[in-house]
Every structure is written in C-alpha cells, then in structure tokens.
C-alpha cells in the first residue's frame, strides 16, 4: 500500500489553504509532487508530522509560483542537516533555470550549501526513470501557457498513478495514462461556477471535465486537486456529487492534510 498526502490542494491564488504539494510515499520511496507556493509548505509538513529531512525526491511540474516557490523554504530546511543526504529534483530544464535564477538572490547562502547534495534529473517528453522500485514516465502536458510536465508512477505491484500537473487531459499523452489505477486531475471549480472562476480561460478544468476525462481514459479512481478554495467548506460533498455524475469509479476530493491510501 502507499498513500498520497495532500499538503496543499489549492489552485494558484488560495485564500484559505495551500497550493499544490502532494507527497507520494510507500515506506520505501517518497516523491513530493510540486512544492506549493512558499513557506506554508513547511507549516503543512509540520501539521502532518512530516519531517522535511525525510523528503528524498521532488518533482516540480512547472515554474509557476504555486508549484515552485516552496523550494525556497525546503532548501533552507535541508541546509540544517548534520549528515546531508543526496536528493533528486526532477524537472524540465526551464524549471531548473528558474530555480537557479531564484537562488541567485533569494536564500543564496542556503542554496550554495545544499546544492552539492542535489541531483537535478532533467525530464523530457517520453522519458522513463527507475526510482528505486518505482517506474516513472514523464510527458509534456502540452500547456498553452507555462510549459508543464506530468508523469505516471508505476509501483512494484503494477498499480499506476497518473499526475497531469495542473493541465486538462490532452490527446498527446492519453496513451501514457490509459487505464491507470489512479488519475490525479486538476479540477478548478464546479461546472456551475465556471463563470465566476473562469477555469477554461486559465487552461484548467471543471469537476465535470476531470470526471469526463477520467472516464475517457478508463481510470479506475479519480483524485481531484488544484481547486479554488472559496467554496472550501462545501467542497467535498459538492465536488463529489458532480464528479459522480460523469465518472463511475471511486472519486476522492481532498482538503489540505487529507491522505489517500491505495
Ligand atoms: Zn497551478
């Protein structure tokens, strides 16, 4: 078994929760999917009783602020280690360039201390990587705005997870996520709220879109993330209700600090 720990479930401009950061772990390997938008990442880790020092692998899908900026407090946390460990950062070249550019000024001293222990794994469309006993495959999410990468993770028991970054499903990588066991898909807002939140103008999805896409690729389970949080109090029941109208498998609608075991 393994779990997804949702340190942050919000889209880019939250008012009451944390931007995207999902820790995937199975007791043997871990991978942080995106790093949220800043220092609240460490607050959430503390609340979830996750020691930042235990994070060994990070995948940053894009250089948008709500996915990349938590790298700053993370690097600061890593600097305090008496016995530093090697860590991998999976990202496209443009994200590595953004990180390097950021640390030219921000937390420069911390980064210089930690950098010798960081291995950047530059990911490309179609690239595979063996991470312990996990098989990672990366794909270009073909975003119309910031370049975004997604990935699938196939675990030792052949359970497959698909993570699309914060982009709606595109034809380009349908084959990669086809019949996956768990599809982690962005769902910016309910279909009925799209006038208010304008998900399509922002290249994001409604819950209906996510559920329809999950059905289209034959996913067994759908997990939503990257959601507006103005309706946080009613999110679980309202999003679940809409998703179930278009997807027949299990649906999980997290709020921050929820875990999903599968
Ligand atoms: Zn985003």
Image (cartoon, rainbow, N blue to C red):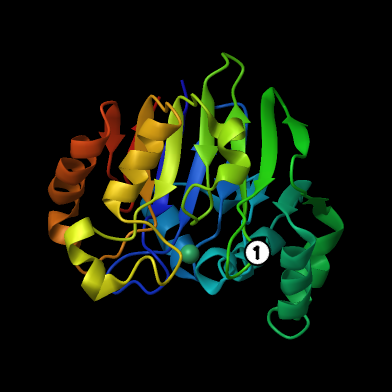
In the figure, residue 143 lies in which quadrant?
bottom right
Q: Residue at x 59, y 66 (%)?
A: 68
Q: In the orientation shown, which residue stands out farthest toward the top? A: 157
The yes-or-no answer for disc 1 within 8 Å of ligand 1 is no
Residue 55 screen position, x and y as percent: 61, 46
Instruction: Examine the rendered structure and indicate whether residue 234 appears above or below residue 220.
Output: below
Q: Which residue is mark 1?
A: 147
Instruction: Examine the rendered structure and indicate whether residue 49 appears above or below residue 103.
Output: above
Secondary structure beneath disc 1?
loop
Front-most of residues 203 and 136: 203
> Left or right: where does residue 220 sit relative to residue 236?
right
Task: Judge the density around disc 1: few (<14), some (14-19), many (≥20) Cα neighbours within 10 Å.
Answer: some
Q: Is residue 115 visible?
A: yes
Instruction: Examine the rendered structure and indicate whether residue 185 appears above or below residue 14.
Output: above
Q: In the orientation shown, which residue stands out farthest toward the right? A: 116
Residue 28 screen position, x and y as percent: 61, 26
Q: Residue at x 23, y 72 (%)?
A: 195
Q: Is residue 26 visible?
A: no
Q: Residue at x 40, y 24 (%)?
A: 262
Front-most of residues 82 and 132: 132
Q: In the orientation shown, which residue stands out farthest toward the bottom? A: 105
Residue 261 screen position, x and y as percent: 38, 28
Residue 146 screen position, x and y as percent: 61, 69
> Left or right: where does residue 216 sit relative to residue 162?
left
Q: How many marks?
A: 1
Front-most of residues 228 and 244: 244
């Amino acid at each position: 078994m393994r779990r997804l720990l949702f340190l942050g479930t919000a889209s880019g401009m939250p008012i009451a929760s944390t931007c995207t950061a999902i820790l995937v772990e199975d007791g043997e390997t871990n991978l942080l999917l995106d790093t949220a938008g800043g220092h609240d990442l460490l607050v959430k880790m503390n609340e979830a009783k996750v020691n930042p020092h235990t994070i060994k692998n990070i995948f940053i899908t894009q250089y948008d602020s709500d996915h990349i900026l938590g790298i700053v407090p993370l690097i600061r946390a890593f600097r305090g280690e008496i016995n530093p460990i090697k860590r991998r950062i999976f990202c496209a070249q443009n994200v590595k360039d953004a990180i390097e550019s950021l640390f030219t000024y921000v937390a420069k001293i911390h980064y210089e201390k930690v950098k010798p222990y960081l291995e950047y794994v530059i990911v490309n469309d179609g690239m595979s990587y063996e991470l312990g006993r996990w098989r990672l495959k990366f794909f270009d999410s073909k975003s119309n705005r910031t370049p975004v990468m997604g990935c699938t993770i196939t675990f030792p028991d052949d359970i497959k997870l698909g993570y699309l970054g914060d982009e709606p499903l595109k034809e380009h990588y349908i084959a990669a996520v086809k019949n996956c066991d768990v599809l982690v898909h962005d769902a910016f807002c309910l279909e009925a709220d799209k006038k208010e939140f304008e998900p399509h103008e922002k290249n994001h999805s409604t819950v209906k879109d996510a559920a329809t896409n999950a059905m289209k690729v034959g996913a067994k389970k759908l997990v939503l993330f990257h959601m507006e949080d103005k309706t946080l109090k009613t999110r679980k029941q309202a999003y679940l209700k809409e998703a179930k109208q278009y997807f027949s498998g299990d649906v999980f609608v997290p709020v921050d600090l929820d875990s999903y075991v599968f």
